[in-house]
Amino acid sequence: MSPSWSLAADMGGTFIDAVALRSDGQITSLKHPRAGGPLAETVVEALDLLRAQAGIAAGDVGRVVHGSTVITNLLLELNEPPVALVLTRGMRDVPVLARQDRKELYEPVIAPALPDAKLFPGALRFEIGGRIDAAGREVEPLDLSALDAIADAVSAAGVRAVAVGLLFSHLNPNHERAVRAALHARLPSLYVSLSSEVDPQPREFERWLTTALDAYAKPLAGDYLHALADALTARGLPAPRVMRSSGGTAPWRDLAEQPIGLAMSGPCAALQGVAASISTCASGPAIVMDVGGTSADISLLLEGRPTFTDALECGGLPIRQRCVDITSIGIGGGSVVSVLPGGALRLGPRSQGAWPGPAAFGLGGDLPTLSDALCVLDRLPPRLAGGIVLDRAAAETALGDVAGALGLSVRRTAEAIVSAAAAEMAEALKTHAFQRNLDPANAVFVAIGGGGAQHAAEVAEIAGIRRVLVMPHASVIAALGMLSDPDEGPVHLAASDHLWDSLPPQGEGPHALFASMTTVWVPAGWSWWLMPDQTLALEAKA
């Protein structure tokens, strides 16, 4: 008998979402909190729990698919060690000078284009002689003698990854390959990214920055994907395929070698999941908002299909990589709240993640977060999916300093935090839609992710949208979307009448709705009802 189950695990900023899909369309799913240990361990724990819950033997599993927001979150938070750059002589400042675009026209002081001190500080940007011309011909031999000193400096600085960017290497990669060979001869364990492989196109700044970000992500991605593959095969499970930002999946070794392809792979999987389901509940353009523990991701479906771009932006960093067209902002359930000197609230981009997590999680976190504000407002259930029991008193204590700085009560502070989050999400949504010639009022608004339905109605109200759809399996739809790989054919889901068992079939706000893995906030002036296909619809009253 051929294997009948497919497993998928999506690693977000706070939870691992795991889905098991049987060949007859039966689904089993769960959410598992991310622990503070190695990334791969948490993924494997989630899959072990899922198999135990569904009674799935290793021999019954035909494929395992993995996706992750780890690289997306890494680029939003920039909390990994910096990388070294090896660039053509005279070009060491090109990645810092960037493109002289002035995004804020009326700001008197312009911030640096890139956080180069975090990514590739000046002491780690090296130059090397040698030149390829615009026709791809060598006009000056590569100065390999300089690499001994570069290798010594890289080793002394404890750098684990190097990005190599040489002029016109997209036409002739021989010099870059020679640099990699020489570095590996001295430092065999060094991670090296070549611009001629990561982004073989003209325009040095874009090519070199994308390559630097690939190198920045490589140690983390390489370590955890290798560990994940080893742990799965030790259990008799197939080696994982990994979700790509451009859609579809690839063998895990391909993404370990070029991890920039993982950026936005989690949101891409979620959009794949929505695209596979939305035809049953909506027509016309759709705006999709996926809110997790670290970020809120906004994207479009046109004629039921995701839209793509050859360049994306993550945390203000331009990346030249084919990807589903997504706008990502650093606001999620774990986003840390602070008060700026002028008295304004700031949310993110720093996130508490799952460990130590929001104060309400009771895992040792003591910084105020968006989830703490939702807990104080009774918009979260006493117990979250994954077995996390919320501590309201801890959430109120965490918000105390913010409340003192604002001169408000803790409850009014929580309301202000949630309103600020909705306003920022709505601004990102409107900008994303209008820049693509779409009026949000003319689109269906789809809420997914663990926090999407918490904020969707408030965001919709600000953006001028009157109806919100909360998808079946909204909280784990990214994991489900990974199994909708175009290369594997369509996924057929068995009908289920138990997704919203705990909810009344219709009602009016203000009301917090708690399902098994999804929480929904229905504000005053909004109503909800359950559609025949198990989609939950929210609508503003006329």
Image (spheres, grey):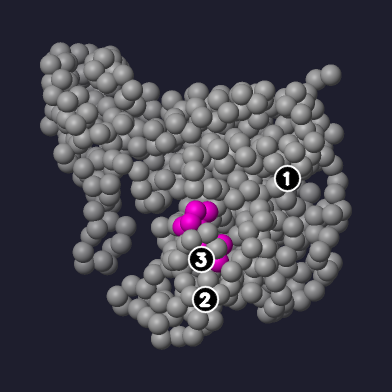
Q: Which dot marks residue 29?
A: 1
x then y, percent, for residue 308: 53, 40
Q: Quadrant of residue 53?
A: top right
At 76% across and 69% down in the image, what residue appears?
A: 528
Please report contact status of discs 1 and 2: CB closer than 8 Å, yes or no.
no
Q: Relative to 173, is 312 on the left or the right?
A: right
Within the magenta stretch, is there residue 455? Answer: no
Disc 3 target residue: 359
> Dot 3 surroundings within 10 Å: few (below 14), some, or many (20 or more)?
many
Residue found 40% across the figure and 46% down from its top: 75
Circles 3, 2 touching at the beta carbon (< 8 Å): no
Q: In which quarter of the image is the N terminus?
A: top right
The residue to which callout 2 is attached is 396
Q: Is residue 110 left or right of residue 55?
A: left
Look at the numbered discs 3 and 1 and tell me whether their residues touch, using CB distance below 8 Å.
no
Range covered by the magenta-colored residues:
352-361
Mark 1 Cα within 10 Å, few/some/many (few <14, many 20+)?
A: many
Q: Say few, some or many: other residues with alpha carbon within 10 Å of mark 2 (under 14 / 14 to 19 / 20 or more).
A: many
In primary-sequence order, the first of circles 3 and 2 is: 3
Q: Is residue 358 above or below residue 483?
A: below
* The quarter of the displayed image where residue 25 is located: top right
Dot placed on the residue nearer the N-terminal end, 3 or 1: 1
Tell me how far mark 1 sits from mark 2, CA to CA.
32 Å
- Kindly state the secondary structure of the residue where label 1 is placed: strand
What x and y, as percent, mark residue 311? 43, 41
Marker disc for residue 538: none
Question: Mark 2 belongs to which amino acid?
Answer: Glu
